[in-house]
Image (cartoon, rainbow, N blue to C red):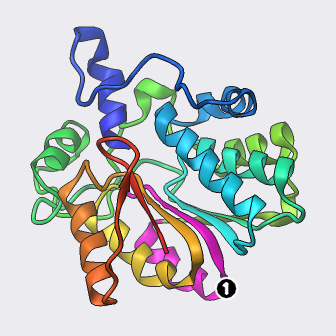
Amino acid sequence: MIGRIVNRIIGPFGLQVTGKSPFVHPLATEEYLRFESIVRKNTMVPQSVLLSLYDQLLYCERNPICGDYVECGVWRGGAVGMMALVNLAHGQDRRNIHMFDVFGEICEPDKAVDGERAIREAKPFSQSDSLDGRLSPLTGIYDSMGGPGTVESVNDLLANRIGYPLGNLCFHKGWFQDVVPTAAKNIGDIAVLRLDGDWYASTKVCMEFLFDKVVQGGFVIIDDYGAYEGCKKAIDESLSSRGISRYLNYVNEETCYLIV
């Protein structure tokens, strides 16, 4: 996520961290494009990744892949908005949508594990030079994009603009390390787990408490596996500790997913 924020800032100077195509994906359907138009202003996810998410959700709704939808790292709710839209259009029953986010600015990376790119991109927004993974916000990181998402703004998108039932919207506000271990106790089966926590510690705690709830045939999407060393390390360690060997399907140079 943070790399996309940096691109918004340095783009006017002719610079870019990673490339993105300005063209419509050839596999984008009319329905997908209609859904994307509803959520586009609420997400930094590039079209290829959002289209992949749409296809994964569609698969879950058309096949017996039961369970909740969970996103860790929500920002303004564009990805969970896609979850709601696909379920409303194709699901027989409404699923619970769990949203984990501080609903503020992302915390600092840890220079010991998260890698040079993470430190380089986070440093301009840090209030200290330590960058040791403290749960301290990177002040101003979302300023160029109008500020961070809030529970109220995400709820407005999902409940008011999209029309998803309030009773199926589950907000878990706080740092992942603080809220995931407790909230996970009340979450049952998961059909889609989308991880967008950027750093090692935030990704690791989500894998530790949520991965084992993903049902057979369900999807685990890792937004920053190819972007930040810490995210990749957390995923690799978590899978290895469970003796799990799965092919990771890359959507673009940063985002991949696995099927449980």
Quadrant of residue 178 within the rendered picture:
bottom left
Residue extent of the magenta highlight: 175-197
Residue 45 visible in the picture: no
At mark 1, the secondary structure is helix
Label 1: how many residues lie within 10 Å, few (<14), some (14-19) or many (20+)? few
Q: Is residue 156 left or right of residue 173?
A: right
Q: Position of residue 75 (x, y in %)?
A: 53, 46
Query: What residue is pinned by disc 1?
Result: 186
Residue nearest the observer in this picture, 45 or 21: 21
| Residue 179 on the magenta segment | yes
Residue 14 visible in the picture: yes
**Residue at left offset 70%, top offset 74%:** 67
Residue nearest the observer in this picture, 87 or 209: 87
Residue type highlighted by circle 1: Asn
Vertical side of 135 occupied by 55: above or below: above
Residue nearest the observer in this picture, 36 or 252: 252
Vertical side of 81 occupied by 193: above or below: below
| Residue 150 on the magenta segment | no
Quadrant of residue 69 within the rendered picture:
bottom right
**Residue at left offset 82%, top offset 41%:** 162
Quarter containing the N terminus:
top left
Q: Is residue 105 left or right of residue 70?
A: left
Number of marks in the image? Answer: 1
Q: Is residue 196 left or right of residue 165?
A: left
Residue nearest the observer in this picture, 21 or 120: 21
